[in-house]
Image (cartoon, rainbow, N blue to C red):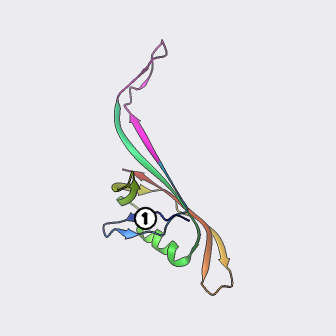
Amino acid sequence: MSYIDIYAGSTKTKLPSPSTLKVDNEIIWSSNTGRTSTGKMVGDVIAEKTTVDITWECIRDADLKTIKTCLKAGFFDFYLPDCGELVKITVYRGTISAEDRGELGDGLGHWYKTVTCSVIQQ
């Protein structure tokens, strides 16, 4: 299993290693973007923004607490690996969804089957 280091917040708190980390680099176009009568695309690129979809599998209460604390409401710093470097972007988060697994009888507390969240660059 590979481990991905991601961090959030001004104190650069390390988040639990996600099972999957999907990064979309999106192009933001000007409002006058569209197709002409000949079908040619016209418009101006305003910016490039990043959306990160994160999935954690089989995590405990303590890990979910860290996720909820770091991925707070509002804007915050988010650090993710990109081409061998740790890149910082300012983001806001979407909904944190947790699929409850319950107690497994292993004495390690409550578990969640999956936890997902997206962070979107400001």
Q: Say left or right for 66 vs 110.
A: left
How crowded pointer 1 is (Cα within 10 Å; few <14, some 14-19, many 20+) is rated as: some
Q: In this view, does 38 lie above or below 4?
A: above
Q: Say left or right for 35 vs 57.
A: left
Q: Nearer the viewer, residue 78 or 37?
A: 78
Outermost residue toward the top?
38
Q: Residue at left 55%, top 62%?
A: 19
Q: Residue at left 39%, top 44%?
A: 49
Q: Does the magenta stretch include residue 25?
A: yes
Q: Residue at left 49%, top 74%?
A: 65
Residue 8 place in picture, x, y as percent: 38, 65
Q: In the picture, residue 119 is in which quadrant?
A: bottom left
Outermost residue toward the bottom?
107
Q: In the picture, residue 92 is in which quadrant?
A: bottom left
Q: Is residue 43 magenta?
A: yes
Outermost residue toward the right?
105
Q: Say left or right for 58 vs 82.
A: right
Q: Is residue 43 above or below residue 37?
A: below
Residue 32 place in picture, x, y as percent: 38, 26
Q: In which quarter of the image is the N terminus?
A: bottom right
Residue 111 place in picture, x, y as percent: 61, 76
Q: Name the residue under label 1.
A: 5
Name which residue type carries label 1. Asp
Q: Which of 95 and 64 is in front in this view?
A: 64
Residue 113 place in picture, x, y as percent: 64, 68
Number of numbered callouts drawn: 1
Q: Residue at left 40%, top 56%?
A: 81
Which range is magenta?
24-44
Disc 1 secondary structure class = loop
Q: In this view, does 33 lie above or below 103?
A: above
